[in-house]
Image: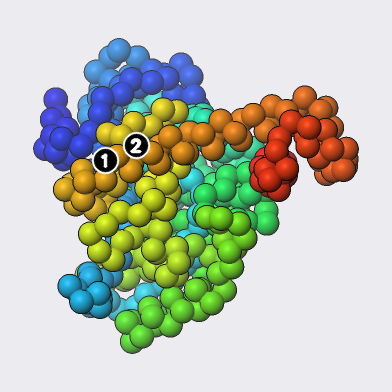
């Protein structure tokens, strides 16, 4: 019997769920919430009430910035010695991992979001059906790539129907990001050579002047970022740097334009409302009812416990704000469905009917929600 505390410390939960991609299997074990290489990792130790040899499933690890902040606000950049760096776009959506497990007789392939053992539905999105919609035609190719590269595959589900901070023009798509073995080895997109799978966009290759290139790319991404509405932007969320080390390892680091970085990362002891709200939205990918404890646990990926505790009341207010936003969105979509019309064909008639249901200052937001769901 594997003790999850040996790998995950106290940051884990037990689970027992039916695998929706293999519905005859009820799978039990532990899932890690530790914000390191074990982020979202599974230990599977039971299938259909029968003990199995414990199986460790590693997923999309938590990536970090290549700098720390000094007391005066300047940054201390620290890149390890690398032979070269591949830079790829960082998509702003929902991460989905393909992985496999066995009951001793058969091998099964399934899919999960970061902090749940399997893809499912939440008030923030029906990720199970989203995944089927965009990726089901590729399942055979995904399994072939997993076997060829002997790894799990990390994907992103992104588009206007799964909006976080970046607003995309496409409705809903997915892209292959990277591979990760159950021993923790990262395979960059270049090392995954299946041309049949949609893949994230490459930005550039770098073999020198890492700090200069980092700062220059951050400026270029910032210059192309445009605010579309409160809390949402067009452009790129950032990029992932794959550092190829002399010993053959591949290390991931991330870069974001300053505006996006300020939402996800604080240059001081304080926690802003924007940071907490963004974390609450992320929490809704994993639970329908985010609690202060759950959101605080996610915030611990970037902030010290005493900072989080000092903002306990603000976290509570941000959760309430986000849940009100979810309720408003659900109400909009319910009223839109009741019209029986397609907004792409009957925009004027749809908005005329909905103008009787919502306040004048909400109509622009109502339209944005409907278009994002179309």
In this picture, is 85 found above or below 293?
below
Asked which colour scheme the image uses, the reply is rainbow
- Give the x, y percent position of residue 79: 25, 75
Question: Would residue 325 appear left or right of 208 to someone viewing this image?
Answer: right
Which quadrant of the view contains residue 358? top right
Q: Which quarter of the rendered picture does the C terminus lie within?
A: top right
Above/below status of 298 relative to 256: above
Picture disc at residue 312: 1
Q: What residue lies at 25% left-to-right and 64% top-to-bottom?
A: 268
Residue at which label 2 appears: 316
Q: Disc 1 and disc 2: Cα gap in Å? A: 6 Å
For residue 30, what is the image quadrant?
Answer: top left
Residue lying at the far top in this picture: please name it: 49
Quadrant of the frame with the N terminus: top left
Q: CB of mark 1 within 8 Å of CB of mark 2?
A: yes
Image spot of residue 92 (x, y percent): 50, 54
Relative vertical location of residue 194 with respect to residue 314 in this rendering, above or below: below
Q: Residue at x 16, y 48 (%)?
A: 306
Does residue 59 sit above or below 91 in this rendering?
above
């Amino acid at each position: 019997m594997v003790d999850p505390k040996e790998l995950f410390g106290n940051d884990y939960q037990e689970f027992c769920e039916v695998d929706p991609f293999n519905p005859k299997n009820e799978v039990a074990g532990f899932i890690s919430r530790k914000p390191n290489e074990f982020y979202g990792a599974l230990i599977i130790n039971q299938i259909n009430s029968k003990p199995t040899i414990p199986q460790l499933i590693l997923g999309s690890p938590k990536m970090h910035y290549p700098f720390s902040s000094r007391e005066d606000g300047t940054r201390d950049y620290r890149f390890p010695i690398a032979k070269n760096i591949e830079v790829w776009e960082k998509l702003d959506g929902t991460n989905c991992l393909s992985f496999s497990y066995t009951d001793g007789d058969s091998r099964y392939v399934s899919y999960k979001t970061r902090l749940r053992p399997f893809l499912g539905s939440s008030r923030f999105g029906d990720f199970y059906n989203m995944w089927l919609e965009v990726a089901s035609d590729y399942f055979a190719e995904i399994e072939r790539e997993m076997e060829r590269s002997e790894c799990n595959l990390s994907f992103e589900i992104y588009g206007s129907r799964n909006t976080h901070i970046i607003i995309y023009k496409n409705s809903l798509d997915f892209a292959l990001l990277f591979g990760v073995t159950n021993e923790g080895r990262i395979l960059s997109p270049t090392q995954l050579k299946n041309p049949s799978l949609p893949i994230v966009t490459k930005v550039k290759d770098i073999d020198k002047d890492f700090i200069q290139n980092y700062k220059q790319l951050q400026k270029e991404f910032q210059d192309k970022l445009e605010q579309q509405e409160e809390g949402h932007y067009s452009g790129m969320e950032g990029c992932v740097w794959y550092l190829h080390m002399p010993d053959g390892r591949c290390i991931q680091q991330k870069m974001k334009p300053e505006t996006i970085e300020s939402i996800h990362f604080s240059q001081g002891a304080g926690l802003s409302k924007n940071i907490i709200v963004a974390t609450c939205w992320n929490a809704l990918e994993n639970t329908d009812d985010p609690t202060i404890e759950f959101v605080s646990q996610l915030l611990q990926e970037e902030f010290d416990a005493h900072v989080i505790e000092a903002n306990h009341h603000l976290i509570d207010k941000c959760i309430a704000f986000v849940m009100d936003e979810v309720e408003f969105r659900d109400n909009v979509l319910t009223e839109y469905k009741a019209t029986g019309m397609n907004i792409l064909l009957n925009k004027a008639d749809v908005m005329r009917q909905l103008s009787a249901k919502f306040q004048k200052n909400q109509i622009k937001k109502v339209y944005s929600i409907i278009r994002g769901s179309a």
